[in-house]
Image (spheres, grey):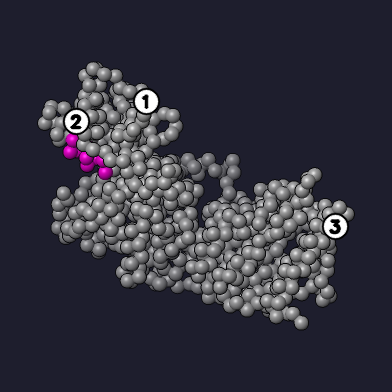
Amino acid sequence: MVKAIYPKGKIVAKTGNEVMAEAMRQISPDVVAAYPITPATEIVQIFSQFVADGKVPTEYVAVESEHSAMSATIGASVAGARAMTGTSSQGLALMWEMLYIAAGLRLPIVMAEVNRALSAPINIHGDQSDTMGARDAGWIQIYSENSQESYDNMIQAVKIAEKAKLPTMVTTDGFIISHCMEVVEVYPDEDVKAFVGEYKPERALLDYKKPFTLGAIELQDYYFEHRWQLAEGMRNAKQIVLDVAKEFKNKFGREYGFYEKYKMDDAEVAIVTIGSAAGTTKFVIDELREKGIKAGLIKIRVYRPFPADEIAKDLAKVKAFAVLDRADSCSGNFAPVYLDVVSALFANGINIKSENYVYGLGGREISTEHIAEVYTKLDKIAKNQVAPSKTVEYINVRIK
Amino acid sequence: MANLKELSKNAERLTGGHRLCAGCGAGTVARQTLLAAGDKPVVVVSATGCLEVSTTIFPYSAWKTPFFHSAFENSAATASGIEAAYVSLKKQGKLADDIRFVAFGGDGGTYDIGLQSLSGAMERGHRLLYVCYNNEAYMNTGIQRSSATPQGASATTSPVGKVKQGKEQHKKDLTAIMVAHNIPYAAQAVIGNWNDYVTKVQKALDTDGPAFINVMTPCRLGWGCKPEDSMEMVRLAVDTCIWPVYEVVNGVYKLTMKPRGGEKKPVIEFFKNQVRFKHLLKPENAELLASIQADVDAKWNKILALCGETK
């Protein structure tokens, strides 16, 4: 359970959605444009109440679709405003076109995203198919294990986005975090405001005395350079993420990085995963450790930019590992996070036995037993008793 | 009423040298819109289309006023975000200036793919002027039919063939849809009458709320007419009552242009110098032509009644 760390902090009981809305209130963006969608609706609903009660100076644009939500947010950001939005699943899918444009225009938009399965079949529950599909859109992606992290991530996201000039989404697992009431430490408004600071855009469309054109057509002669700059911006964002995390720790006391390592120092078998399943995994690790299995975890927080070399270095010492993906790729090959991890290892000349599991689609439960089974098999793989699977494996699904 | 002498003193905010075709009305729409704004600061948003691609080929821009484009279907939503930022920053005392917002879109970007975005922006009441430069088809991608394409017109996705005679459906009445949003200002115009158009833009920009102008403008490639005839073409659309020119201020209709000479011309006068309609002149299409004439007559009578022009 979360304990108070910041001397001026306050311990409250809030759901993931409530605490994300609370962060947005404290950030007080100039414009929020959003559209309701389960399970993210509450975030903008609560925020609308803040607007209605005059607690924020924000203009709330209740748009008619997520495509317009992202379009209006982009417009507001280009105009020179600090602009935010929130969505989930089909909403993010409808924003697709505009996600790439927000990134290509280098707009520091922050989005509160609640991970939910994509249709079809329609399903409202948590998995990471939605944001995994947006992994190459040019957005920084920060995932949260619990409500505290989602709150802290939102606050940091504003600074990261504005320094990196890249849109940033902060995600939570649908229902598991978004609707689960947890103990969270919140910080005083003035301290959060001081941390995020005033937004000073490099240029603003509303500064009409210095007119400029944005969104011009670029052909064979310029397009490539600007896309390269975007990719380079994402590479450069790694240091910005670390700098903001350091600043955050110095101010509020909580430590963040690209990922969290749990009992990795002497781990022989490891799981790499993202989001709320990491909490369950930690519990399993503690049990397995008592049985003599040296299990460890890498919980990825920042998936874009992907901390490839860092993960490769930290996984180098294990004998076998598994990546647990809460999204499939339908590529006929492995799931997204596994592919990233394996390519990071390969590029660093590291060859470790590994497996890839897809779990929890559409909110399907993952239990401690499921995770323990993965570790048990990894232990056998590490001891050369069994060979790792050459294809993606599925947890808790009726295949036949 | 606009004054040409005064307009000529206004700064040009769309410079020459852009890549629009000779005879294209889109540039004229943009230029006259900005001239009508006088010395008011204007932020321009455009949907993807000829106007946008021809005026902003990086690293060049023809716009001497803030200009933004992001996608095809979202000109209105984008402008509403900009306007919301303006309202927010003004409310917070971070901005003092009085700025106007104009969103441009072609008929494809407005009647079809951008209709939802436009409807949302109008319903929410943002203070912005949306100008649809309507050349009655997707001209930028090569003359495909849109819901603004009139019945009988040949387009590359409603071509004339052995069994079909161009587009089979009637065009959508988008201006009526905008009027149904109960916005304070909506109008139809043609680019061939600068005075009528500029006056409408001035009224729209002075309106404290959403405004919409649907301005018919030729695409000489899509219509198959001579570039020097562009202005005359749309005047013929007015003379034949194919394109009624009127405004609706707070729900009250007013006819602002009448056929020259006071007499309505047959639709064939508009059709005969445009390649997209040439098949309608064939004897075997006489019945289709008659039914188009009947439809135009009925719609014109409806507009006359709305404008209180019925004797």
Distance between mark 2 and mark 3 Cα atoms: 84 Å
Residue A235 at x, y percent in the picture: 38, 40
Distance between mark 1 and mark 3 Cα atoms: 68 Å
Mark 2 vs mark 3, foreground winner is 3
Q: Amino acid at mark 2?
A: Ala
Q: What residue sits 85% from the left and 57% below the top? A: B286
Q: Is residue A381 magenta?
A: no
Q: Is there a contact, CB below 8 Å, between mark 2 and mark 3?
A: no
Q: Tell me whether marks 2 and 3 sit on the same chain.
A: no
Residue farthest front in this picture: A400
Say whether residue B208 is left or right of residue B239.
left
Q: Which residue is mark 2?
A: A295
Q: Amino acid at mark 1?
A: Thr
Question: Element type at marker 1?
Answer: loop
Say whether residue A91 is left or right of residue A174.
right
Q: Residue A391 shows which numbered tag?
A: 1
Distance between mark 1 and mark 2 Cα atoms: 23 Å
For the C terminus of chain A, the quadrant is top left
